[in-house]
Image (cartoon, grey):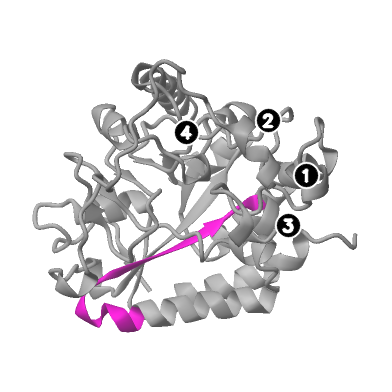
Amino acid sequence: MNAPLHDAPENQPRTHPGTSPHAHPDNRLRPHPDNPLPTPADNQLYDYSPIVERAPIRWPGGARVAFYVGLNIEHYRIDRPSTSTFAGTAGLTPDPLNYGWRDYGPRVGFWRLLKALDRHGLRASALLNSEAGEHYPQIIEAGRARDWAWLAHGKNNSTFQADMEPEEERAYLVEMLDSLEKTTGRRPRGWMGPALTETFRTPELLAELGLDYVLDWTNDDQPYRLNVPGMLSVPYSVELNDIGLFVSKGLTGPDFVRVVKDQLDQLHEDAADGGRVMSLALHPFVIGQPFRHKYLDEALEYVTNHPGVWLTTSDDIAAHYAGPTEGAEGAQGAEVA
């Protein structure tokens, strides 16, 4: 195919990287016209905190870097446009080209990726759409057998967490969380919105429903407290992310390995004055392609054998940071490479 894989990301509205710009209006739940949501001019969710002025974070075993795999396990609606490899058909219903590309993930790519995680002894932090839990029970069974962390990731990845009235959003979240608890056997502790979307009220509602942290605000190398009681932000990355690297930027497998190594080496150096977090965001329909598998294996080999790395989950990072002395105590079952 001679057409470009995607429109230039800097020209696209905010959405999941690689999604056609024509898709966005249909992917949002609209507000009631008589009661629009507030849009504060200044960010009230968290305060500015330069990393050079913070107390040091200490990870278990003296590790410098806490590493986790953010494994996106997603379900896409066939009647809505979403993350696309070819914008030319993204607005069609059905869209076999892009829907089939995404659907490769749960059918094939996930199972190839699973072998790599097992080979390197890594537990995933599974970012799970509740509809994925309902549609792909074999995937849930595989994750439960490996004691994965399960994070809420909305109902599906074709509907963004945006523009909802408070009670509508609360009901939506309760239904999603109940479904996730039923399928995984565990109430999620963390959240990442579909395409990292939230309303202004999402963190507060999540806290009221018993969650501890969000991944949506990708602005730091350390966890930090939000201005919502009991709620943290844990680092996630849209840069060290297979969709951004392979689909948006067109990097190769060897490029991917180099980026992972460079990210870890730099964070390890930075962590001389306090622990850092490194997330590796993966999507089975992207990294699970056959020609990319060996490069994932090579990257994970480097990470899991790197000195001073705590191989963990986002749940354990949040729990450790929120501990009695905020990042100073050890965690049970910590593994340091």
Residue under label 1, please give it.
98
- Image quadrant occupied by the N terminus: bottom right
| SS category of the residue bearing label 1 | helix
The residue type indicated by label 4 comes to: Gln
Q: Earlier in the sequence, mark 1 or mark 2?
A: 2
Residue 51 screen position, x and y as percent: 23, 70
Point 79% across, 42% down: residue: 100
Secondary structure state at the residue bearing disc 4: loop
* 142 to the left or right of 336: right
Marks 3/4: CA distance? 23 Å
Above or below, 75 relative to 16: above
Q: Nearer the viewer's eye, disc 2 or disc 3? A: 3
Q: Is residue 163 above or below residue 317?
A: above
Q: Earlier in the sequence, mark 4 or mark 2?
A: 2
Residue at image point 65% right, 51% down = 284
Label 1 vs label 2: CA separation? 11 Å
Does the image show residue 137?
A: no
Q: Is residue 298 left or right of residue 85?
A: left
Q: Which residue is mark 2?
A: 77
Q: Please state which of residues 142 and 254 is positioned toward the viewer in this rendering.
A: 254
Q: Is residue 305 left or right of residue 300?
A: left
* Residue named by callout 4: 161
Q: Secondary structure at mark 3?
A: loop
- How far apart marks 4 and 2 lie (CA) works out to 15 Å
Give the magenta part as a residue range. Answer: 268-284
- Whichever of callouts 1 and 4 sits on the residue coming sooner in the sequence is 1
